[in-house]
């Protein structure tokens, strides 16, 4: 139980550092990385709560949250890279 409390305090400290990075990030990519880390921290908190409560349903929710976070990171990364949601090859009209 003591290990669980120590890990919770460390997780909270990392979350505070991560929130600072989300607010003060100089670029959108830095904010995106901080948001992805926040998603991972939320999944870790759910796993920690699952260990504390002894219920396995929170592990399933943590896995789903992590999968959605990966999809979110890929979509936002593609948007930041290409500058638009869908990539279409530029074609010239030949008249």
Image (cartoon, helix red, strand yellow):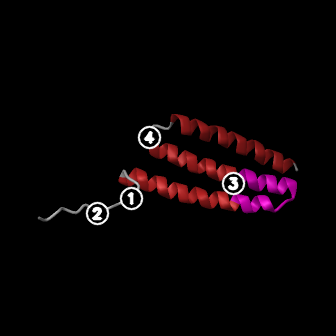
Query: How many angstroms separate mark 1 from mark 4 (CA)?
Result: 22 Å
Of the residues under marks 2 and 4, which one precedes in the sequence?
A: 4
Camera-near label (3 vs 2) is: 2
The Cα atoms of the two marked residues, 2 and 4, are separated by 27 Å
**In front of the other: label 3 or label 1?**
1
Residue visible at 64% across and 58% down in the picture? 66
Per the image, is 3 magenta?
A: no
Q: Secondary structure at mark 1?
A: loop
Look at the picture and state if 16 lies above or below 93: above
What residue sits right under mark 1 in the picture?
86
Disc 1 versus disc 2: distance between alpha carbons? Answer: 10 Å
Q: Which residue is mark 2?
A: 89
Q: Nearer the viewer, residue 3 or 19?
A: 19
Q: Residues within 10 Å of mark 1 (few under 14, many from 20)?
A: few
Classify residue 66 as left or right of residue 1: left
Residue extent of the magenta highlight = 43-62
Residue 44, image x, y percentages: 71, 53
Mark 4 highlights which residue?
27
Which residue is rendered at x = 50% and y = 38% of the image? Answer: 25
CB under 8 Å between discs 1 and 4: no
Give neighbour class at mark 4: few <14, some 14-19, many 20+ (Cα, 10 Å). Answer: few
Q: Earlier in the sequence, mark 3 or mark 4?
A: 4
Calculate the distance from the C-alpha at mark 3 to the C-alpha at mark 4: 25 Å
């Amino acid at each position: 139980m003591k290990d669980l409390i120590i890990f919770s305090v460390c997780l909270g400290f990392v979350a505070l550092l991560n929130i600072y990075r989300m607010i003060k990030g100089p670029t959108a990519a830095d904010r995106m990385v901080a948001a992805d880390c926040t998603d991972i921290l939320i999944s870790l908190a759910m796993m920690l709560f699952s260990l504390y409560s002894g219920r396995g349903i929170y592990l399933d929710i943590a896995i789903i949250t992590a999968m959605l976070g990966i999809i979110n990171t890929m979509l936002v990364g593609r948007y930041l890279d290409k500058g638009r949601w869908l990539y279409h090859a530029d074609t010239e009209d030949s008249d």
